Amino acid sequence: MTTLTACERSEKSAIVIEHLTKTYIGKKRVRIEALKDISLSVTCGEVFGFLGPNGAGKSTTIKCLVGLLEPTKGHASIMGNIVPQIASRRNLGYLPENPAFYDYLSAEEYITFVGSSFNMTKEQLTPKCEEVLKLLGLWDARKRPMRSYSKGMVQRVGLAQVLVHDPEVYILDEPMSGLDPLGRSLVKDIICDLKRRGKTVFFSTHIIDDVEKICDRVGIILHGELQCVAKVEQIVNEGITGYQVRSHRSETGVFTDHIVSKEELTDFLNRLKSSGEDVVLVEPCRQHLEDFFLALVGKNKQST
Ligand SMILES: Nc1ncnc2c1ncn2[C@@H]1O[C@H](COP(=O)(O)OP(=O)(O)OP(=O)(O)O)[C@@H](O)[C@H]1O
């Protein structure tokens, strides 16, 4: 029998952001409108990628979501609990953009500290601590003070502290940052595993390729405004830019590849047939999420 997670049992959205607006007051009282009326919701069990160039407002959104910043207007809720109520953080794992820990503690001490602050018993904590430290490749270094850790190791501790209490919702600010390709691949595997277990993941990144592979939906933010929220599948499928056609001439045995536009496809296939060539492959050339993102950012640059 499959056991449903609390998230799957609840029919609510896991994360709701409504009219979130944040204005910072910078030096000389300069107003910086970091977020302008952002609304979106993330369904339970969904992996949501939050994309945007530097300074777009990703971290500000995330800080408002986890209660570290007070929005100027609007509000957010997590599993039905309004942020910053304590209940909104009980079922939450949060990875900050640049994690900084009590660096005189070892990873083992820190993960134990985090687990116990979520009321885990020693019996629950000991095996879970071992599991996450091993998963993140920190087992051998677990007794060393974190001040001796590399940047990537600190990022791994950040991920371990997110996982230790097995929350329902994960909010990760640039989880792949500072990691080598092996580390990035591990993070992708972890996110996919969380999804398999019905957990909800909201993460920001610059690495569009990773988003395309693991997210159900993406939101793109530019200059504090949410430009679009769409299914990755939809962006990729709607963006068919043409077709690759492979033909074969039996008399010569030669295969030829052609790139044909959407509009020309039918005529082209008819012409091939009448010239006696066999069509052995017709495959759509799809735009990648990166193309979509760059086009959106480029368009926005031109209009500002
Ligand atoms: N504490 C602050 N005081 C004043 N302005 C701030 C503050 N924090 C962020 N900002 C400004 O708010 C805007 C959004 O910043 P934010 O850090 O949310 O962007 P980001 O998308 O996370 O960028 P990056 O990808 O570079 O981390 C930027 O213009 C930034 O300069």
Image (cartoon, helix red, strand yellow):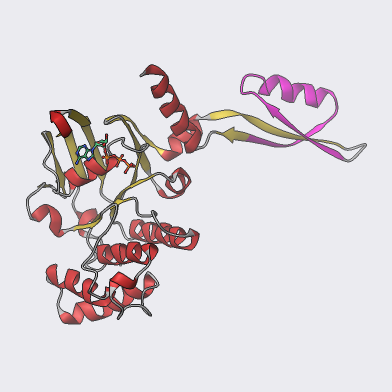
| Residue at the left extreme, as displayed | 85
Which residue is pictured at 14% across the width and 30% down the height? Answer: 28
Note whether 22 is above or below 194 in the view shown: above
Classify residue 76 as left or right of residue 198.
Answer: left
Of residues 245 and 138, the one drawn nearer to the viewer in this rendering: 138
Quadrant location of residue 194? bottom left
Percent across and percent down for residue 249 are: 86, 35
Residue 27 sits above or below residue 267 on the image: below
Residue lying furthest right in this view? 251
**Where residue 43 appears, x then y in whole percent?**
26, 45
Identify the image quadrant of the N terminus.
bottom left
Is 249 left or right of 110, judged from the image as shown?
right
Q: Quadrant of the C terminus?
A: top left
Q: Nearer the viewer, residue 242 or 223?
A: 223
Magenta residue span: 254-283
Residue plotted at (20% across, 48% down):
11
Residue situated furthest front in the rendering = 28
> Measured from the top left, where is residue 30 in percent x and y?
17, 28
Asked whether, in this view, residue 174 is left or right of residue 31, the answer is right
